[in-house]
């Protein structure tokens, strides 16, 4: 299928993009990498009158360290994250996730901001930003605000973003020295989206886990932090017993998706297996 006809305009600044969004009052869409939006337009799930290309706004690109944080522009591609030395050293979970997104073409064009704004329940980035305790920086007509990853995802393909707002960058606290993190997933064999994806970040105090965050994607209608699994690890040594307890607790008491790719029972099983794999790999 082909999309309905639409106009195209490139914005050079965040303010210009916001102004265009306002002028078109809900009938315009931001275009980032186009790897979710264009397929949706071809299926006529979306028919915006105007596409506002934000992919070349310089202020929304790049990866840098500032004041104990890593800041990633929303238009940074999956490939740029997968190949960042800074991230490999400070936030390896992001590199691990970026490397397993889609295929080479998807990684070259798709952006972290586009993925988060789209909030596909099987996308990889939502679990990663939750486990990394990221803050999402949003600009709109009335100014700017920071939203924690925990408050950003509000349900199935829905987020805290208003129609006239733009996600401009992401702020990740750099975990304390000695912390470890990773991302693993069971990929749908054709699309590579996550049937189950699991992001973990663990900080140690001597031999015991002083803090940890565990987040899943693909399991429910939106990515979520698994606090029961986290509680099973906190204060314990990271060993076979504590890993088993965390895996046993994983994805319990959660509304689990069921579709023609995987039943509810199978997804729950995968969540436990992939949490165990993630923790064992640290
Ligand atoms: C074949 C294929 C395989 C894929 N496999 C995977 C996979 O394994 N894992 C995975 O996670 N994803 C996968 N994807 C999705 C891919 O990662 C997309 O790049 C991503 O979901 C959307 O990013 P984008 O930059 O292409 O955004 P676009 O498609 O341009 O935009 C997506 C939506 O977000 C909005 N938007 C974009 N940027 C912003 C912004 N800065 N602020 C506010 N709103 C914004 C747009 O208006 C649109 O509604 C796959 C896609 C394809 C086509």
Image: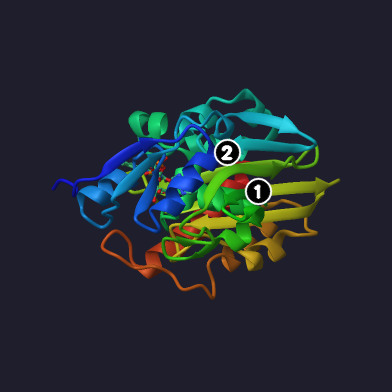
Residue 200 against residue 13 in the figure, above or below: below
> Residue 130, percent across and down?
61, 54
Quadrant showing the C terminus: top right
The CA span between labels 1 and 2 is 9 Å
Which residue shows up at 47% across the image and 63% down it? 222
Residue 158 against residue 116 in the figure, above or below: below
Q: How is the image coloured?
A: rainbow
SS at mark 2? helix
Which residue shows up at 46% across the image and 73% down it? 255
In the image shown, does 20 or 31 lie closer to the viewer?
A: 20
Mark 1 crowd level (few <14, some 14–19, many ≥20, 10 Å Cα)? many
SS at mark 1? loop
Residue reaching furthest to the right: 206
Residue 276 against residue 88 in the figure, above or below: below
Q: Is residue 277 visible?
A: no
Residue annotated with mark 1: 132
In the image shown, does 240 or 45 lie closer to the viewer?
A: 45
In the image shown, does 32 or 130 lie closer to the viewer?
A: 32
Which residue shows up at 20% across the image and 53% down it? 43
Disc on the earlier residue, 1 or 2: 2
Q: Is residue 22 visible?
A: yes
> Residue 120, percent across and down?
41, 55
Residue reaching furthest to the left: 1
Which residue shows up at 56% across the image and 54% down it? 275
Q: Are marks 1 and 2 in contact (CB under 8 Å)?
A: yes
Position of 179 with respect to 95 (left or right) is: right
The circle on residue 94 is: 2
Position of 200 with respect to 187 (left or right) is: right
> Residue 84, percent across and down?
58, 26
> Residue 254, percent across and down?
51, 72
The circle on residue 16 is: none
């Amino acid at each position: 299928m082909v999309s309905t006809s639409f106009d195209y305009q490139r914005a050079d600044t965040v303010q210009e993009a916001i102004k265009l969004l306002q002028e078109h009052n809900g009938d315009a869409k931001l275009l980032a990498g186009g790897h979710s939006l264009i397929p949706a337009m071809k299926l006529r799930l979306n028919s915006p009158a105007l596409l506002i290309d934000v992919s070349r706004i310089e202020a929304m690109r790049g990866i840098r360290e500032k004041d104990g944080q890593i800041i990633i522009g929303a238009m940074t591609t999956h490939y740029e994250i997968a190949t960042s030395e800074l991230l490999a050293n400070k936030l390896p979970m992001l590199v691990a996730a970026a490397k397993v997104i889609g295929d080479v073409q998807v990684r070259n064009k798709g952006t972290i901001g586009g993925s988060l704004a789209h909030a596909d329940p099987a996308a990889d980035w939502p679990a990663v930003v939750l486990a990394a305790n990221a803050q999402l920086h949003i600009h709109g007509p009335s100014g700017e605000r920071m939203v924690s990853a925990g408050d950003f995802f509000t349900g199935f393909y829905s987020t805290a973003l208003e129609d006239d707002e733009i996600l401009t960058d992401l702020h990740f606290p750099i975990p304390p020295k000695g912390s470890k993190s990773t991302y693993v997933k069971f990929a749908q064999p054709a699309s590579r989206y996550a049937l189950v994806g699991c992001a973990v970040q663990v900080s140690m105090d001597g031999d015991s886990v002083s803090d940890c965050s565990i987040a899943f994607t693909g399991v429910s209608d939106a990515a979520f932090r698994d606090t029961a699994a986290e509680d099973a690890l906190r204060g314990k040594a990271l060993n076979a017993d504590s890993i088993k307890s965390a895996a046993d607790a994983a994805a319990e008491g959660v509304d689990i998706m069921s579709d023609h790719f995987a039943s509810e029972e199978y997804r729950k099983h995968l969540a436990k297996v992939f949490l165990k794999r993630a923790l064992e790999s640290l």
